[in-house]
């Protein structure tokens, strides 16, 4: 383990006993962590309002004045490329009376005009016009700047952190971008060929949990299992991210593969999962955003070199394999598990790990839960 968790022995207890820091000897998180509105509310504040969250790619903002809106947990944000080419993020809220400023994505004029009373902000967030405010007392436009959000760019991907006092991105995520670039050197120039949205009836962690282990693949994804060799070539586990490289097998219909090509999975705190599937240049980015205690707004962005989306038959095969098959299989699984968390017949199970960290290990699942508990604990101690 690359990090010593700071938990002060404050572990939750369920029907099978206390959660333990040793994955080989611990029951899983009690089911209430997936169903309790109070825990969910604490997670928003302890995790989602203060962690680096993936929102898109620099090629989404291909020229000055282009923008997109997004949601981080329940917060609406704007990401915009300024006339100086800098990319900035702001809360999507007018400082006059709180109206939303922008919707969707597109290209702005000289700035952002509020649709309610036409307060006008430049692309750097400064209030430059506020009609009929000449005679109001003690009004200083400089105090009505849009609320800025810290932003980081790494390997072409854009991340924001809603906490103005957050730790720098580099502190724990510094190695993540280079890890992606070492496998996909041109990722900084890739474009989003597809952007898919799934409303899933499951807690956001139920969906991340499922991504974090390969134990279920031979059982629940028989077609995908044809592509994936069960040997693990590389495994790197850092505090806030991890990287696994498997090998691919041949014989999947429609996918022209050489045996042994890399099949890569990355995961980053709190809810970012990525795959690069063999046979074409691609990065599939999944973001399991919370959308209520038992709802997840999953977004899937499929990045490829420009022009490949229409022309590369392997890429089309991968997209279909992902969209029509194994993501559908996973959604059915996590919705079933979420119903299970509400069953009177279930509270905790076991992590299936092994000391050698074989391909099937649920070590990353336990690692993710340690981080959840640490974040909640740290937040509780701060606010107590
Ligand atoms: S709320 Fe935006 S101008 Fe009034
Ligand atoms: Fe799966």
Image (spheres, rainbow, N blue to C red):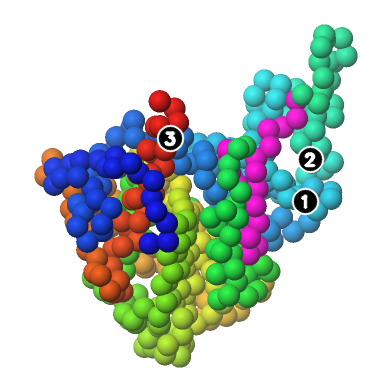
Residue at image position (46%, 34%) is: 45
**Is 367 on the left-hand or right-hand side of 84?**
left
Q: Which of marks 1 and 3 is in front?
A: 3
Residue range of the region highlighted in magenta in the rendering: 144-163
Q: Residues within 10 Å of mark 1 (few under 14, many from 20)?
A: few
- Residue position marked by numbered label 3 in the rendering: 379
Residue at image position (65%, 30%) is: 93
Q: Quadrant of residue 130?
A: top right
Q: How crowded is mark 2: few (under 14 residues within 10 Å), some or many (20 or more)?
A: many
- Residue position marked by numbered label 1 in the rendering: 86
Q: What is the tally of numbered marks visible in this picture?
A: 3
Q: Which of marks 2 and 3 is in front?
A: 3
Residue at image position (63%, 64%) is: 155
Could you tell me if the residues under marks 2 and 3 are in contact, i.e. CB atoms within 8 Å?
no
- Residue position marked by numbered label 2 in the rendering: 124
Could you tell me if the residues under marks 1 and 2 are in contact, i.e. CB atoms within 8 Å?
yes
């Amino acid at each position: 383990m690359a990090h010593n968790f700071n938990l002060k022995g404050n572990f939750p207890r369920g029907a099978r006993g206390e959660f333990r820091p040793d994955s080989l000897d611990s029951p899983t998180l009690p089911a209430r962590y997936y169903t309790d509105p109070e825990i969910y509310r604490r997670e928003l504040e302890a995790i989602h309002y203060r962690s680096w969250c993936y929102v898109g790619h620099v090629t989404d903002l291909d020229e000055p004045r282009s923008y997109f809106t997004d949601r981080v947990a329940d917060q609406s944000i704007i990401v915009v490329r300024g006339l100086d080419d800098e990319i900035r993020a702001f809360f999507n809220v007018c400082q006059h009376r709180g109206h939303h400023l922008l919707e969707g994505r597109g290209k702005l004029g000289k700035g952002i005009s509020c649709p309610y009373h036409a307060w006008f902000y430049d692309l750097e967030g400064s209030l430059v016009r506020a009609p009929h405010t000449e005679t109001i007392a003690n009004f200083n436009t400089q105090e009505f700047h849009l609320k800025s959000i810290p932003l980081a760019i790494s390997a072409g991907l854009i991340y924001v952190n809603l906490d103005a006092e957050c730790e720098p991105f580099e502190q724990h995520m510094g190695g993540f971008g280079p890890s992606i670039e070492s496998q996909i050197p041109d990722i900084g120039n890739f474009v989003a060929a597809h952007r898919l949205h799934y409303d899933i009836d499951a807690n956001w962690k139920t969906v991340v949990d499922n991504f974090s282990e390969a134990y279920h693949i031979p059982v629940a994804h028989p077609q995908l299992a044809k592509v994936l060799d069960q040997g693990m070539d590389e495994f790197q586990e850092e505090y806030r991210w991890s990287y696994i490289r498997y090998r691919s097998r041949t014989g999947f219909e429609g996918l022209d593969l050489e045996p042994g090509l890399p099949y890569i999975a990355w995961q980053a705190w709190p809810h970012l999962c990525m795959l690069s599937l063999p046979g074409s240049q691609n990065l599939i980015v999944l973001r399991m955003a919370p959308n209520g205690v038992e709802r997840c707004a999953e977004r899937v962005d499929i990045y490829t070199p420009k022009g490949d989306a229409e022309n590369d038959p392997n890429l089309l095969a991968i997209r279909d394999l992902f969209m029509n098959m194994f993501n559908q299989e996973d959604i059915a699984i996590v919705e079933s598990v979420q119903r299970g968390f509400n069953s009177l017949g279930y509270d905790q199970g076991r992590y299936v790990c092994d000391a050698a960290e074989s391909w099937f290990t649920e070590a990353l699942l336990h690692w993710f839960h340690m981080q959840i508990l640490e974040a909640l604990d740290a937040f509780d101690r701060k606010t107590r």
